[in-house]
Amino acid sequence: MGLTIVITGAGGGIGHALSLEYALPHNHLILCDFHQQKLDATAELCRNTAETVETFTFSMENPAEIVKSADQMLEKHKSLDRIIFVNGISQRGKAINTSIAIYRKIMEIIFFGIFLLTKKLLPALLQTQHPKIGVTSSISGRFGFHQRSAYAASKFALHGFFESLRLEHHKDGLSVSIICPGRINTPISLSAITENGQKHGQMDPGQSNGMPAAKCAQKMRKAVEKGKKDVLIGKKELLMVYFKKYLPFIFNKFANKINPR
Ligand SMILES: NC(=O)c1ccc[n+]([C@@H]2O[C@H](COP(=O)([O-])OP(=O)(O)OC[C@H]3O[C@@H](n4cnc5c(N)ncnc54)[C@H](OP(=O)(O)O)[C@@H]3O)[C@@H](O)[C@H]2O)c1
């Protein structure tokens, strides 16, 4: 029996790879993203193996578009098996130089957009026997980071929301996996938003030397399917998460020395 799976950010680096991971015979994919062209490219590849693939293009910044797309999904699918949020936008800029408009934009895309889509689709997800949500946070959702104050704040907000949702629907069998990638080789730094609202436009070494997106997606799917609650994916950068938790004096010594790129 196939699964009906909603994936956001499906045209991006990790989202593209995750869509391919879930593009299994019998599965029904509902792929969402901002730019039609990238989304279509993912969908075309997934159609080689998945049972059906639908696409929805909308901005996670736009509540009306989110509601409209969710209603269209629900018209066709009374029950969903997985919702996996992979959409996001990164940041390069110090808080002191960054306007509140940029903070609001990042919070809309990463937090409020995800909150609203969850709220709309949750009743359909709870119709299935083993409902699962996967949400992509970051190691910046575990500790604050240079030039990422809005990004880190939005990822921390996801933890608060989804940890609460997990408790509220424990009795409904809802599993919520909060995935924290470290540095993954995707173009995320190219579209990261800077202090003046422009795109950073550079492939930073953190990304180019990061774990391949396909490997990250493979680990993500396994974690979501096993119902793992909190998941770290990456390389040696994950050490900082353990330092913060178990050896905070080491974390505090090194946190200032990490290259923000
Ligand atoms: N790569 C890393 O090192 C890393 C580390 C930790 C966490 N993450 C997280 O992993 C997730 C996937 O990121 P990625 O690395 O694969 O980067 P990516 O390739 O830039 O993917 C992000 C996706 O989100 C979409 N998106 C951006 N703004 C949107 C909006 N307003 N509405 C709807 N969708 C929007 C992007 O669409 P467009 O490109 O079409 O604008 C893109 O498809 C993100 O949540 C990110 O925060 C990544």
Image (cartoon, helix red, strand yellow):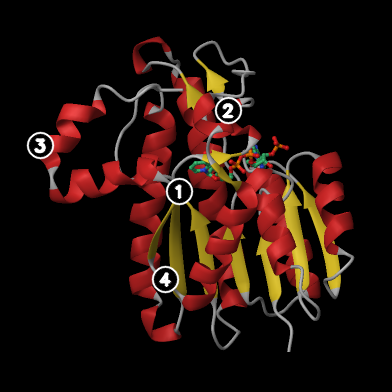
Q: Is residue 119 visible?
A: no
Pair 2/3: label in front = 3
Compared across the picture, whether 138 is left or right of 36 comes to left
Q: Which residue is mark 1?
A: 234
* Amino acid residing under circle 1: Gly
Rendered image: mark on residue 228: 4
Q: Mark 2 and mark 1 in contact? Answer it, CB < 8 Å.
A: no
The yes-or-no answer for disc 2 within 8 Å of ligand 1 is yes
Which residue appears at 76% of the width and 63% of the height? 30
Q: Which residue is mark 3?
A: 249
Compared across the picture, whether 26 is left or right of 161 comes to right
* Amino acid residing under circle 3: Phe
Q: Is residue 35 visible?
A: yes
Secondary structure found at label 4 = loop
Instruction: Locate residue 13: give its quadrant.
Output: top right
* Amino acid residing under circle 2: Ser
Give residue 57's position: percent from left, percent from top: 78, 47
Q: Mark 4 and mark 2 in contact? Answer it, CB < 8 Å.
A: no
Which residue appears at 65% of the width and 33% of the height? 187
Q: Which residue is mark 2?
A: 189
